[in-house]
Image (cartoon, helix red, strand yellow):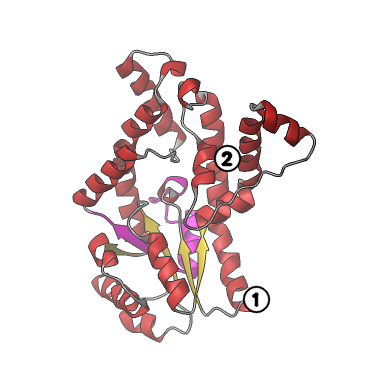
């Protein structure tokens, strides 16, 4: 690791971390706090995915929907209106909307084959966007003068790397330039995230083999055809299974390349000094 002890961290002229773990445990909040209250550059992998790598796909998806409306169709064909994605660090809805949900088109679903195609694009984009962090470390200092750097990774990082391969190219590069920090949640945290997800199911990234098994099991359980699946029901069905699949992968990543902090510790961070103390405790436990 690039910081072995608390003293290494506190004395470092350049502090660089990558935050990873389940979405909803505070990665973006902490990154934004460091950006707003201290001299940190905030690099969001999801934002990079949605702008640099998936932006055209996202906007094309908007246009397909707009073309179904006769009024908007004519305006689009005559170049009278302009459609764009307004994705931000805190609003990733355009990316989620593009990923979509498989199932009944009358309920907003898309064919499973198309869903798989979009998932594959997301995987490629996430790998590229995560590796781009290394270039942004240099750009952040050279162009903007930032001394410190926080990489706010996607919740699906553990699915696009091999946590058991010490030579995994994405993680070895990331760990060579930053300190990977796992935000670990408890069972109670998972229950709270599941309850929140049940109220507003959102598209997510799944590893393809896992997704295919999940889809086939759901079809068998429900006794229905693919175009009869309730998209939200399938996404809810998959959420807890996906979280259970991810937890040991996150743990292996932290054990091999980084440190672990508890979600309760993260929730208590209120300023950059608290964050320094959090990292020092994690390094001390390592």
Mark 2 residue element: helix
Q: Nearer the viewer, residue 275 or 244?
A: 275
Position above or below: 116 against 174 = above
Q: Residue at x 42, y 31 (%)?
A: 211
Q: Residue at x 72, y 42 (%)?
A: 81
Position above or below: 157 against 149 = above
**Residue 100 location in percent, x, y?**
50, 34
Q: Is residue 77 left or right of residue 241?
A: right
Residue at the spot of label 2: 121
Can you tell which quarter of the image residue 120 is in? top right
CA separation, marks 2 and 1?
30 Å
> Is residue 46 one of those drawn in magenta?
no
Q: Quadrant of the C terminus?
A: bottom left
Report the magenta residues as a range. 159-185
Q: Residue at x 77, y 41 (%)?
A: 80
Residue at the spot of label 1: 143
Of all residues, the one furthest to the front in this rendering is 71
């Amino acid at each position: 690791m690039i910081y072995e002890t608390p003293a290494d961290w506190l004395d470092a002229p350049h502090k660089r971390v990558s935050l990873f773990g389940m979405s909803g445990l505070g990665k973006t909040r902490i990154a934004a706090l460091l950006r707003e209250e201290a001299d940190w550059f905030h690099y969001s992998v999801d934002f990079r995915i949605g702008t640099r790598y998936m932006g055209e796909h996202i906007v094309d998806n908007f246009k397909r929907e707009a073309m179904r409306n006769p009024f908007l169709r004519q305006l689009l064909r005559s170049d009278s209106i302009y459609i764009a994605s307004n994705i931000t660090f805190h609003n990733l809805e355009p990316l989620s909307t593009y990923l979509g949900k498989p199932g009944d088109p009358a309920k907003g679903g898309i064919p499973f084959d198309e869903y798989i195609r979009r998932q594959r694009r997301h995987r490629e984009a996430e790998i590229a966007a995560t590796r781009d962090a290394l270039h942004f470390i240099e750009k952040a200092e050279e162009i903007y003068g930032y001394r410190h750097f926080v990489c706010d990774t996607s919740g699906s990082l553990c699915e696009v790397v091999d946590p058991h391969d010490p030579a995994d190219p994405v993680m070895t590069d990331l760990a060579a330039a930053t300190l990977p920090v796992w935000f670990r949640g408890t069972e109670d945290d998972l229950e709270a995230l599941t309850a929140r997800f049940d109220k507003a199911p959102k598209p997510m990234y799944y590893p393809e083999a896992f997704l295919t098994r999940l889809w086939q099991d759901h079809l068998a359980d429900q006794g229905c055809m693919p175009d009869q699946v309730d998209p939200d029901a399938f996404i809810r069905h998959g959420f807890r299974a996906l979280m259970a699949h991810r937890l040991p992968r996150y743990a292996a990543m932290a054990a091999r390349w980084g440190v672990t902090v508890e979600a309760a510790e993260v929730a208590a961070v209120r300023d950059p000094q608290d964050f320094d103390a959090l990292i020092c405790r994690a390094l001390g436990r390592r």
